[in-house]
Amino acid sequence: MTYDLVKVSALGNLAAPTRDDLLYLVNEPGGAPASYRSTLQAVVGGPALLIAASDAGAAAIKKADYVCDGTDDDVQIQAAIDALPAIGGTIQLSAGTFNLTAPITFPAKPLCFTGSGSMAQASAAYPSVTVLAWTLAGVGDCITIAATADGQSIERLELAGDAVNTRYGIYLASGACYKSFRDVAIRDMAVAAVKGDSGNSQNYFERVKCLDNLEYGFSMYGICNRYVSCQAGRGAGLGAGGVAGFMIHEGGTSYVGCTATRYTVGFYVSGYAESVSLFGCHGEQNIVHVQISASAGVEPKATTVIGFLGADATSAILGAFVIGRSFGVLFLGCHVKDSASDITYDISALAEVVTIQGGYTNDATPVQDVGGTRVSIHNVHGYVAQNQGAAAAVADGGTIAHGLSGTPTVALVSGSLASEFVSVTGIGAANITVAIKKHDGSAGTAQTIYWRAWV
């Protein structure tokens, strides 16, 4: 028996296929057919349609299914998307600039929306970038993603707004799930580069670069979304401001290797956030790098920050990390340097259960704690959390300097004379006060006191 090898791309569509022409798809070997497709191309993900920009190369224009003229290019792009069958497919955009005057909407079908070349911001150094540039007459969102279709993605292109009417670059409608975004640059949006409404979940963002968006890079509600090597930054021309690079109202969400620059807050873990984790993230020239707080009833719960690197926080009065009304915060092995306020961890009286373990800071005040509940600080460079010693010639009512960076929560003392009793009568920001008594209650003898205290 011999076989002829034929490329899938060489297989044509059958105008009127019979049952014998169809490829069976089955759930299990030997099972009943689950569905039929007339071409292998449909089986592996639907057709691919090429759209050429008005300034694309001659080769791209020649083979394109749709060619734009540089005016209202949204018409051809939306037409190509709508032309895909129900099983979806790929929209391939050529290199070049597409000029759009209306939003693009993803329908409820699988869709890969991809550009060409580098994801870097378009410039003379990167001429092969696909740029979609919007100028809208009224307030709108550049791309709206439907909630009802899995398997949608945006890759390898730049979305450019007009900084006035382009509200969001990508808007994830409520319930949008299982979308992916890779190698995308989004700039000059009036509110946020990416906005996710409540109920979106399990979406994946990798190397999404948000530049010069006025209020937020990402403003996200949702569950179990993942962010890897994403960036939210405002250029030197805009300066520090906006609201937050990453505004986080999510649950079960992780940010890995993400960066925020020149926002009021780099990473803002706010209302409804639960089990949010920041791993190896970085903040630079934000007013505050990380803030964890919200109003009563929607406080963030179980926030973990590991290996964060923060530099040059610009607030003159707040710490680089602000921990407000919240429950269960863990900072582990973080490194902060050169904060304008000279404060690293700024803990509010409304914070409950805060643990700070390890790490380094060159700020003069590593921890400013104004009364948080159950705050535990260990092995932070420059912060003395526990100390002990032997103080000589301490009299009844005398004091011992404990040398801790904060007021101790526990202080233990014992005397050097077996016949007398020693106890702690006061704990202050600088000293421990002790009483030394004899059995009859009179003042005891001045003696060496052995002590131990910790914050």
Image (cartoon, rainbow, N blue to C red):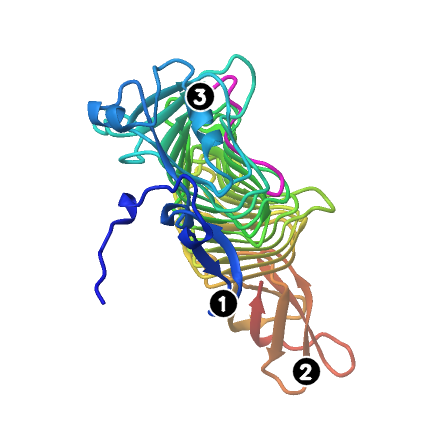
- Please give the residue where the numbered disc 1 appears in the rendered image: 28
Front residue of 73 and 357: 73
Q: Which quarter shows the N terminus?
A: bottom left
Q: Residue at x 46, y 52 (%)?
A: 19
Q: Is residue 278 left or right of residue 182?
A: right
Overall secondary structure of the magenta section: loop
Upstream in sequence: badge 3 or badge 1: 1
In the rendered structure, find residue 349 and report the number of the disc placed on it. Answer: none
What amino acid is found at the position of numbered circle 3 in the picture?
Asp
Extreme-right residue of the structure: 440
Asked if residue 149 shows in the view, the reply is yes
Q: Circle 2 is placed at which residue position?
A: 420
Q: Nearer the viewer, mark 3 or mark 1?
A: 1
Position of residue 258 measured from the top left corner of the image (x, y, whole percent): 41, 45
| Amino acid at the residue labelled 2 | Glu
Residue 332, image x and y in percent? Answer: 47, 59
Q: Position of residue 376 (x, y in %)?
A: 57, 62
Q: CA distance from mark 2 to mark 1?
A: 84 Å
* Residue annotated with mark 3: 74
